[in-house]
Image: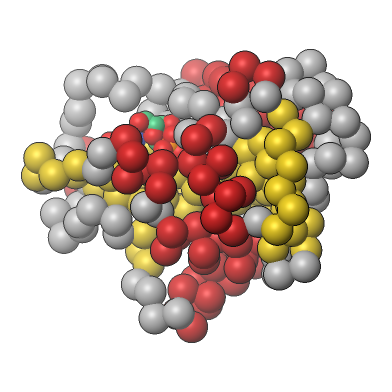
Amino acid sequence: MSFHIGAQQGQIASRILLPGDPLRAKYIAQQYLTGAVCVNKVRGAYAYTGTYQGKDITVMGTGMGMPQATIYFTELARDYGTKTMVRIGTCGAWQPDMKLMDIVLATGACTMSGMNRRIFPGEFAPIADFELLNTAYEIAGQKNIPVRPGLINSLDAFYGDKSDVWQRYGVVAGEMEGAALYTVAARYGARALTMLSVCDSHYSSDELTAEQKEQSLDTMVQIALDTAVAF
Ligand SMILES: O=P(O)(O)O[C@H]1O[C@H](CO)[C@@H](O)[C@H]1O
Ligand SMILES: O=c1cc[nH]c(=O)[nH]1
C-alpha cells in the first residue's frame, strides 16, 4: 500500500494506462483486460490489473487536475515502481481544423501551473518519452488511424478566461494533467506519454457526453494498449 493507493506491492503492473475518469478505467478493464482484478478503490480512484496480449497491465483513474493526479503519478512511480505510464485523457481542441474524437499525441506540455514549479525547483520542460511517442505514432499508422502529434497546454483552471496566444503558437489542445505526468515521470525514471481524445472545441459548441467520455474512446484506448505492451 502507499499513502493514497490500497493495492498491495505486486498488484500494480510496470505498465499503466491513466485516464482521469475512474469509470473510464473500469470500462477499459471490462472491455479489454483478461482476468482484471480491482486493486484500488480508495477515494474512488479505481485501479484494475489484468493482462492484455498476455502482458500484465494496470489501468487507474487519476481524477481531474494536477494536484490530485500528481499524488497518484508519484506513488505509482516511486512506491510501486511503475515504468511505463500512458495517460489516456480528453481535451479541448485548440486548432480550428480539429473535430470531436480526434486523437492528440502530446509531444510536450506547456503549463503555467504552480504544480510543476513545486515538483521541480525551476522551469522544467515536460516532454513525452520519444520511444513511447514514436511507438504510439507507428501503431496508429499501422491501424490507419490519423493522430496529431503536438504541444498541449496543461491548465489548472477548467473555467479560466482564455487567451488565443496558445493557438497562435500552434498549441493543439488543452487538458489538465499532462505536464505533471511528464515531470513526475522524469523525476522517477519512468517513461510517459499523454494521449488525448477531443471532447470539445474552442471553435464549435460540439461536445462529447459523460457517457461517451467513459465508454467510446476505444480507438485511442486500443492504440494506448498496444503501445504500452510494447514496453
Ligand atoms: O478526461 P480526463 O482524462 O479526465 O481529462 C480531461 O478531462 C477533465 C476535465 O473535464 C480533466 O481531467 C482533463 O484533463
Ligand atoms: O476543454 C477541455 C476539455 C477537456 N479537458 C480540459 O481540460 N479542457
Q: Does 35 sit above or below residue 210?
A: below
Q: Nearer the viewer, residue 36 or 15?
A: 36
| Image position of 2 (left or right of 85) | right
Q: In this view, does 198 lie above or below 68?
A: below
Q: Residue 115 location, x and y as percent?
A: 54, 21
Taking the image as shown, residue 98 lies to the left or right of residue 46, namely left
| Image position, residue 99 (x, y; %) | 20, 56
Q: Is residue 55 visible?
A: yes
Residue drawn where x is 51% and y is 45% of the image: 27
Tell me what residue is drawn at x 41 percent, y 42 percent.
Answer: 214
Which image quarter is the C terminus in?
bottom right
Number of numbered tags placed on the structure image: 0
Question: As drawn, which residue projects farthest toward the right?
Answer: 9
- Residue found 46% across the figure and 26% down from its top: 64
Indicate the position of residue 212 as horizontal and vertical percent values. 32, 45
Q: In which quarter of the image is the N terminus?
A: top right
Colour treatment of the image: secondary structure
Name the residue: 55% across, 19% down. 67
In this image, 138 relative to 168: left or right? right
Q: Quadrant of ligand 1?
A: top left
Q: Does the image show residue 127?
A: no
Q: Quadrant of residue 43?
A: top right
Q: Say which quarter of the image contains residue 203.
A: top left
* x then y, percent, for residue 103: 36, 59
Q: State the residue in front, 167 or 181.
A: 181
35 to the left or right of 227: right
Task: Give the residue furthest to the left.
Answer: 204
